[in-house]
Image (cartoon, grey):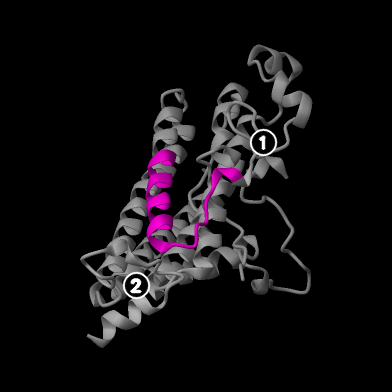
Amino acid sequence: MTKRETLLKKISTYQFAALDTQLYLNTHPNDSAALEKAERYNAMAKPLIEQYEEQYGPLTKNNNEGNRWNWMKGPWPWESEDDC
Amino acid sequence: MFVYEKKLQYPVNIKTPNPKLAKIIITQYGGPDGELGASLRYLSQRFTMPMPELKGTLTDIGTEELNHLEMIGAIVYQLTKNLTEEQIKAAGFEDYFVDHTTGIYPQSAGGAPFTAAYIQSKGDAITDLHENMAAEQKARTTYDNILRFCDDYEVKDAIRFLREREVVHYQRFGENLRLLTDKLDEKNFYAFNPEFDKACFRKKQSK
């Protein structure tokens, strides 16, 4: 795995933990411990997303930085570095 | 609405092409128990669902299935990347190749194109939740069957993740069904259609 892929995997791990907990919350809306966990996982992902977007470009379109449009720049999620 | 995140839900990094395996795995893209059907099933059923919990669960699982559709597309793409004509012949991939080259097309392992007949949206929450629980189990069995033919760790790893999600979704749909029946007449859940006969909820609440 490249450095980029390792960072992206870390982000995905926290995001997935949040997503799975949020899915559980739909049927257990009063579980405040789970709610806290979901918030904590998202908070852990946040600085990593910022770091990733600064180094490798936007994960969502609205987070384009600089004066050039970088959204369409590869690799796309199904590709690896050597596809570009 | 939907907003795209430029990443997969779980990474797919397959280094070794295997067109024979791709032809099996494509069934989870557009086959009878595949991710395309799953996302359309849930995202369509949710409009008439009667309770907030059900609308939330169907929206979230339906959206997650779109992530899974993308992962399957990535797996098939990577398994069929940079193929030579010899590799295509040796793997028996000519029948797919002649129609789609290495493009990703929603079809079953047997080559049947995707059809909306794979899904149901019945307008009855009890019926639809049972359909969804069965659908998750059918997808789980399909992933189990796919795993029998995988020896590449990278492929197995991604397929195992997807298989596990079917189990979790089954659990969540089961909870939805319980939450729904808790609100209905416990002597006869089937006296009303909880999506169409809205009175069945009002009656219970006024007791």
Quadrant occupied by the C terminus of chain A: top right
Q: Nearer the viewer, residue B179 or B141?
A: B179
Above-or-below relation of B104 to B189: above
Q: Which residue is mark 2?
A: A40
Asked if residue B111 lies left or right of residue B127, the reply is right
1 or 2: mark nearer the eye? 1
Is B147 displayed left or right of B47 in the figure? left
**Chain letter for mark 1:** B
Asked if marks 1 and 2 touch (Cβ < 8 Å), the reply is: no
Identity of the residue drawn at 28% across and 66% down: B181
The residue under label 1 is B113
Callout 1 secondary element:
loop
Q: Residue at x 51, y 50 (%)?
A: B38
| Residue B147 rendering spot, x and y as whole percentages | 42, 29
**Is residue B170 in the magenta section?**
no
Question: Label 1 is placed on what type of residue?
Answer: Pro
Q: Is residue B126 magenta?
A: yes
Q: Is residue B16 visible?
A: no
Residue B202 x/y as whole percent: 34, 83
